[in-house]
Image (cartoon, rainbow, N blue to C red):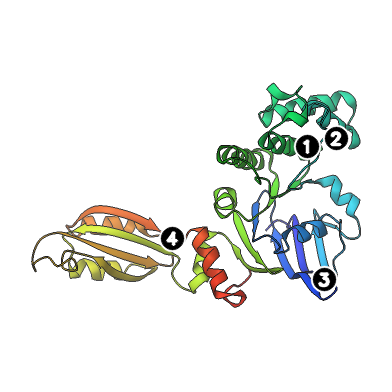
Amino acid sequence: MEQAVIELKRLTKKYGEFTAVAGLDLSIQPGEIFGLLGPNGAGKTTTILMMLGLTEPTSGTATVCGIDATRNPMLVKRRVGYMPDDIGFYEDRSGLDNLIYTARLNGIPAKEARERAEELLEKVGLSSAAGKRTGAYSRGMRQRLGLADVLIKRPEVIILDEPTLGIDPEGVRELLALIRDLSRNEGLTVLLSSHHLHQVQQICDRVGLFVGGKLIACGDLDTLSRELDGGPSHAVELDVSGWNDRLAERLTAVEHVVSVETVDSDALRGAAPGTPGIVTVRVTGTADVTPLLAALVVEHGASLVGLRPMRYGLDEIYHRYFEGGESSGRVH
């Protein structure tokens, strides 16, 4: 496995008696889009500030791009782009001027600075507004310009703190698609901090659930849903005409299948015994064997009328972890 781009070990930050971040362990791999998800006040921004060397941890370490962020914050800043939730620009200058200024501050020669700025404005869809004063930009346009601003120095990692705050739904969709494309096409590692469930679910490879300064669970959706109950992570509902005991036994015997349960049928609906109809069964298991289940139904002479793969969505995972408290989550 490649060396982690971001490595946090027992990272802790206290303000007097208050613990903002408690013993945080987290590894993020190159090219990964990682979502740090939690309510406001959970400690997400404090964690980011420690990663950037902008505040010192009480204990523990934050290593970014192989650099200790506390001991060498300037080296980290050269290789990491950071976009806070409300990025500031010179309001009376154009978007192009602001980007060129940032590039020059990072030691990029004037000609190259202009070329990079124009290229990035094209990538983020702001070419037509390049000469417009940023004071007249909408919130969505400012966030797009913010992305270009953090990318101007060609960082290895970008950290985005609530990047979609205050943007309309269509603007959110476009911005998230842009972040995903930049990560995939440029090979960027992205850490996205947010309290919006569905936005994180749309683009992140893995998610960390963060509450009360603690990372209570971490993984992709399958991992989180499996850890939620410590049981099956996959479920599929099959609507079958011609359901019989022999078919039920065959599906139950499939590797990775944990249970086969009838959830709806003519008998359950009060139809007369022996009336032909459709039986709905829910098959749960530890892996996705949906194609095999469908094939077995047909092989046994039954008709597959409907098929609905099911699994926990991030919103259900999130709320059920919080209902269970900190003890219900495990970190990996």
Out of 312 and 42, give the one closest to the viewer.
42
Disc 3 and disc 1: Cα gap in Å?
Answer: 32 Å
Q: Contact, CB < 8 Å: mark 1 with mark 2? A: yes
- Residue wearing tag 4: 311
Examine the rendering and report whether any part of residue 107 can be seen: no
Kindly state the secondary structure of the residue where label 3 is placed: strand
Q: Position of residue 317 (x, y in %)?
A: 52, 64
Kindly state the secondary structure of the residue where label 2 is placed: helix
Up the image or down, 221 lies above or below 107; here it is: below
Q: Residues within 10 Å of mark 3 (few under 14, many from 20)?
A: some
Disc 4 and disc 3: Cα gap in Å?
Answer: 38 Å
- Residue wearing tag 2: 102
Q: Which label was assigned to residue 14? A: 3
- Residue wearing tag 1: 149
Residue 19 sits in quarter? bottom right
User: Which badge, 2 or 4, is on the more N-terminal residue?
Assistant: 2
What residue appears at the point 69 percent right and 69 percent down from the top-left corner? 212
Disc 4 and disc 1: Cα gap in Å?
Answer: 38 Å
The residue under label 4 is which amino acid type? Arg
Q: Position of residue 15 (x, y in %)?
A: 84, 70
Q: Position of residue 267 (x, y in %)?
A: 16, 68
What residue appears at the point 86 percent right and 23 percent down from the top-left corner? 111
